[in-house]
Amino acid sequence: MNPKPPMPIWQGLFRIIIRLTLCGALIFGAYLTHRILALRDQPIKISISLIGVRTNETVTFTTKEGTFPVREAMFLITNLGRSKAVQEGYYRYESMRYAACGEAGINLGNQGLSSVLSAGQSRTITVVCPFLMHGPWRPVFVFSKYSWRHRIQELPPWKFEMLRPFVSEKWLMAIPSEPVAGSWVDSGPAGE
């Protein structure tokens, strides 16, 4: 029997390089998976603080108690989390005095509220102070984590239609969201 001739050096180096590359790819894949899962499990962290209340003298409303200028409250919304957060385009009021608010609790179609906040990003918004609510109140905004559902909904129509047979409509429409309350505002319609 003839013994096998020794392997050339370049073949041995090639095998070592292949093994190191595969090990590096596995480690990198594990790292990416860990990062994706870690970000997915992060809760939404949103800070909403009152900047101030201003009176808009050009617009008024009338009640049984008289005619009053419209008051607007400005809030600073900051994403304190490590992933993107989506602010939905509606909000409701909470009253410290009344458990169930008779004011229009949900305002739909406020395009100025809809936005995506990156990690650490802030923005200032203005909401109209509730007309019929006396005493302290606060707005409650709705946020959700930026997820694959948002990415699919942002696709061009032709790509969205290609994916539609493979993704349940129920999955696309049911975006998990959570309410986040703002700071209390101690003013009623006439500055009470």
Image (tube, rainbow, N blue to C red):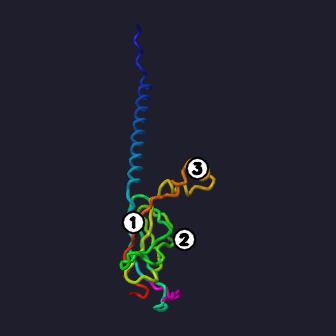
N-term mark: 2 or 1: 1
Neighbourhood count class around disc 1 (C-alpha, 10 Å): few under 14, some 14–19, many 20 upward = many
Residue tagged 3: 163
User: Going 62% across and 56% down the picture, which residue do you hit?
Assistant: 157
Residue tagged 1: 46
In the picture, the disc for residue 149 is none
Task: Tell me the kind of residue under disc 1.
Answer: Ile
Task: Tell me the kind of residue under disc 2.
Answer: Gly
Residue tagged 2: 109
Count of numbered circles on the image:
3
Q: Position of residue 113 (x, y in %)?
A: 50, 70
Determine the image quadrant of residue 100. Answer: bottom left
Q: Nearer the viewer, mark 2 or mark 1?
A: 2
Secondary structure of the residue carrying numbered label 1: strand
Secondary structure of the residue carrying numbered label 3: helix
Marks 2 and 1 sit apart, C-alpha to C-alpha, by: 22 Å
Q: Are marks 2 and 3 in contact (CB under 8 Å)?
A: no
Stretch in magenta = 54-63
Point out the image quarter for the N terminus. top left
N-term mark: 1 or 3: 1
